[in-house]
Image (cartoon, rainbow, N blue to C red):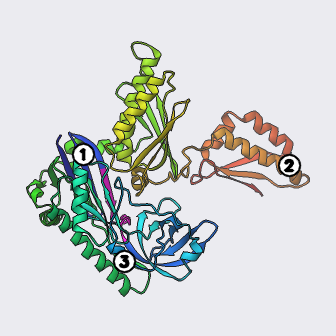
């Protein structure tokens, strides 16, 4: 399997595409006007504690206060270093790459006080109306490991499946005996003791520098910034499978070469400056794929299609046979459509970076074996996803519940904004609906107009006026009889289709 990483740089935007055998399989977009905060570490000040929600709002120097849930607060939140006693204890081992969860039984009001200063890390970017989500459990990603300076934990990436290799890595980390916790990343598979030790020692020094910066800073604000998107992508995506890294900017190329030379020297020869006239992303039609991933309806090769709708914390995906009529029987047609949809859904979730709760409405299947086949295929396809996913179940109606870890805004949220005309609803009222709203309001005013010599003038959109004269003539006559006077219309070119005002002059 061969893969390539494409880094497309513009003054205000950097895009990184991971292309696997010619197919876009991962995409990162970051704009200077809205960089990601995930991974950044801040000195925060608690501004409000909410016992009823077991959460707190924390000022970290941003416009909007960040959110800290009790489960993300260490019991020893005021101590930024592990004590000497903690460091002497053996590493608490886990089975995968998940940072150990902490279920505090202590109420938040006993852990935090308003005005208290704490060291926090951004776990999730602000999404919609919500501020950034914080944690006090710091994690510092390196090339081969994630270093956890505040806990004693040892974990191995779930993508490293060979048990002998997992055991080898456990013993190496235990031998190194780091001052904090360590999770070995997928890239750490096959790493030597020297490579792991160098990574851990670098991150240990970085953590100490962060704690010093925290102590020096007296007001809420940033004490550590994550790497730029192009360097993060190389740190997380670079592997033996990547044959080339194309960069279309001279300065960023130098920056990437320096980074790779320092942390991944064996891949230095894979970094290539792209100097052709043809745009870099056009090599694999990536812009076309991005445009396709911003559509609500995605057509499948068979003629079926899926519809993807994003809410604030929920993604709903509907599968339809569309033009696909199959060849054998209905059940076969349904199974083939659902299986093709599974592959496209997994692909779209990665490119769109959808997260949170995801509900997939597959076409209803009568055979239990078909339902199991679809679930198995979905699980296989999601194994390629770097974000953590969890399939819960499939109901009798063919609904699959799953979750996908959401850290950053989705592609739609990054590249699009709510429609200024429909205000993000996705629809507007029919002209007939607006016309009837006008008539009903005039009926309510009929009593007020008795014995008054006033004219009725309605300011509204031209299309509504045209509709009333062309289709609602009888309704207009009826309302004029009821009012005892004629109704005049004044066209307002700048009015929204749903907007109108009634004046009595």
Which of 456 and 281 lies nearest the eye of the viewer? 281
Residue 217 picture quarter? bottom left
Image-based side of 37 in relation to 500, left or right: left
Relative to 74, is 191 above or below?
A: above
- Dot 1 surroundings within 10 Å: few (below 14), some, or many (20 or more)? few
Residue 272 picture quarter? bottom left
Residue at the spot 16% in from the left edge and 42% down from the top edge = 2
Residue 300 locus on image (x, y percent): 37, 30
For the stretch drawn in magenta, the main secondary structure is loop
Which of disc 1 and disc 2 is earlier in sequence?
1
Q: Does the magenta stretch include residue 32?
A: yes
Which of disc 2 and disc 3 is earlier in sequence?
3
Span highlighted in magenta in the image: 27-40
* Residue contact at pointers 3 and 2, CB within 8 angstroms: no
Relative to 205, is 390 above or below?
A: above
Q: Which residue lies furthest to the left in this view?
A: 269
The dot on residue 85 is 3
- Dot 3 surroundings within 10 Å: few (below 14), some, or many (20 or more)? few
Nearest to the eye among marks 2 and 1: give it. 1
Image-based side of 504 in relation to 389, left or right: right
Q: Does the magenta stretch include residue 468?
A: no
Nearest to the eye among marks 3 and 1: give it. 3
Q: Is residue 321 visible?
A: no
Q: On the image, numbered disc 1 is attached to which residue?
A: 162
Q: How far apart are marks 3 and 1 (CA)?
A: 34 Å
């Amino acid at each position: 399997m061969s893969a390539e990483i494409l880094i497309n740089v513009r003054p205000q935007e950097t895009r990184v595409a991971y292309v696997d055998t010619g197919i876009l399989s991962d995409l990162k977009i970051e704009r200077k006007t809205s960089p990601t905060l995930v991974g950044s570490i801040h000195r925060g000040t608690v501004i409000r504690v909410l016992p009823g929600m077991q959460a707190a709002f924390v000022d970290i120097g941003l416009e909007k206060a960040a959110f800290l849930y009790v489960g993300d607060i260490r019991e020893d939140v005021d101590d930024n270093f592990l004590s000497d006693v903690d460091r002497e204890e053996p590493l608490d081992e886990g089975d995968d790459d998940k940072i150990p969860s902490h279920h505090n039984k202590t109420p938040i009001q006993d852990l935090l006080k308003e005005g208290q200063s704490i060291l926090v890390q951004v776990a999730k970017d602000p999404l919609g109306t919500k501020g950034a989500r914080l944690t006090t459990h710091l994690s510092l990603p390196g090339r081969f490991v994630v270093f956890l300076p505040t806990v004693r934990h040892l974990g191995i990436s779930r993508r490293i499946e060979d048990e002998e290799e997992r055991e080898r890595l456990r013993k190496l980390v235990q031998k190194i005996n780091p001052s904090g916790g360590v999770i070995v990343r997928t890239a750490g598979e096959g790493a030597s003791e020297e490579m792991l030790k160098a990574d851990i020692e670098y991150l240990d020094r970085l953590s100490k520098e962060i704690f010093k910066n925290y102590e020096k800073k007296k007001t809420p604000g940033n004490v550590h910034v994550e790497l730029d998107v192009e360097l993060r992508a190389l740190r997380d995506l670079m592997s033996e499978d990547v044959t080339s890294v194309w960069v279309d900017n001279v300065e960023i190329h130098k920056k990437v070469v320096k980074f790779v030379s320092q942390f991944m020297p064996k891949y230095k020869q894979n970094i290539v400056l792209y100097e052709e006239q043809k745009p870099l992303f056009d090599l694999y039609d990536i812009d076309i794929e991005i445009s396709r991933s911003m559509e609500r309806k995605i057509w499948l090769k068979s003629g079926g299609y899926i519809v993807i709708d994003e809410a604030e914390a929920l993604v709903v995906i509907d599968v339809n046979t569309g033009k696909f009529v199959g060849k054998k029987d209905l059940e076969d047609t349904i199974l083939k459509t659902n299986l093709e949809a599974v592959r496209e859904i997994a692909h779209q979730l990665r490119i769109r970076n959808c997260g949170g709760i995801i509900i997939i409405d597959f076409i209803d299947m009568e055979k239990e074996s078909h339902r199991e086949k679809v679930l198995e295929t979905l699980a296989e396809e999601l194994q390629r996803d770097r974000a953590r996913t969890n399939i819960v179940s499939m109901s009798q109606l063919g609904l699959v519940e799953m979750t996908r870890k959401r850290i950053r805004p989705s592609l739609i949220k990054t590249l699009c904004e709510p429609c200024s005309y429909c205000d993000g609803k996705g629809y507007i009222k029919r002209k007939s609906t607006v016309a009837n709203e006008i008539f009903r309001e005039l009926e309510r005013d009929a009593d007020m107009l008795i014995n008054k010599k006033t004219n009725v003038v309605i300011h509204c959109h031209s299309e509504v006026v045209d509709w009333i004269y062309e289709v609602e003539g009888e309704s207009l006559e009826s309302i004029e009889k009821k009012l005892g006077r004629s109704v005049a219309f004044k066209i307002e070119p700048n009015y929204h289709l749903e907007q109108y005002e009634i004046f009595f002059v």
